[in-house]
Image (spheres, helix red, strand yellow):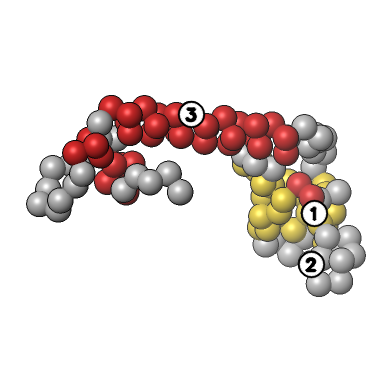
Amino acid sequence: KDNFSPVQKLYCHPIQDTLPAHHRSFSQEWQTKLQASDQQREHTLASSESFYNTHAQSLPDIHSVAIQNPHSKLWDIYGVVVDISPYRRYFVKTQSGRVLVCNRRFLR
């Protein structure tokens, strides 16, 4: 898509090897295009993260939660929130002692 070899992406400059390369592939134009594509990718990631976090709500400071059963779609598993990780991942210890990793979407 961006016409850069994996080595150029990794080291941010072309390497010298025995494979023939066109003399224009070492020009500064390609380096500036690489930097521009990196900046565009960072901007896209930042904007998509802000879009998905626009309406995201954090779980209130309560200890007991209900977990949606993935098969029956009922809220019949109950547990206690043990840890909260980034990206809305919650570690919930159930009444049976199992620790489940749940997304915020499946907790109540």
Please state which amino acid type lies under the numbered disc 2: Pro
Of circles 3 and 1, the one toward us is: 3
Tell me where residue 69 sits by quadrant. bottom right
**Image quarter of residue 57:** top right
Q: Which residue is mark 1?
A: 106
Between disc 2 and disc 3, whose residue precedes? 3
Find disc 3 in the rendering and name its residue: 39
Q: Taking 58 as reference, is 11 left or right?
A: left
Which labelled disc corresponds to residue 70? 2
Circle 3 crowding by C-alpha within 10 Å: few under 14, some 14–19, many from 20: few
First reached walking from the N terminus: tag 1 or tag 2: 2
Of tags 2 and 3, the one toward the viewer is: 3
Q: Secondary structure at mark 1?
A: helix
* Tag 1 and tag 2, C-beta contact below 8 Å: yes
Residue 15 makes an appearance in the image: yes
Q: Residue at x 88, y 60 (%)?
A: 75
Instruction: Say left or right for 63 vs 46.
Output: right
Specify the amino acid type for callout 1. Answer: Phe
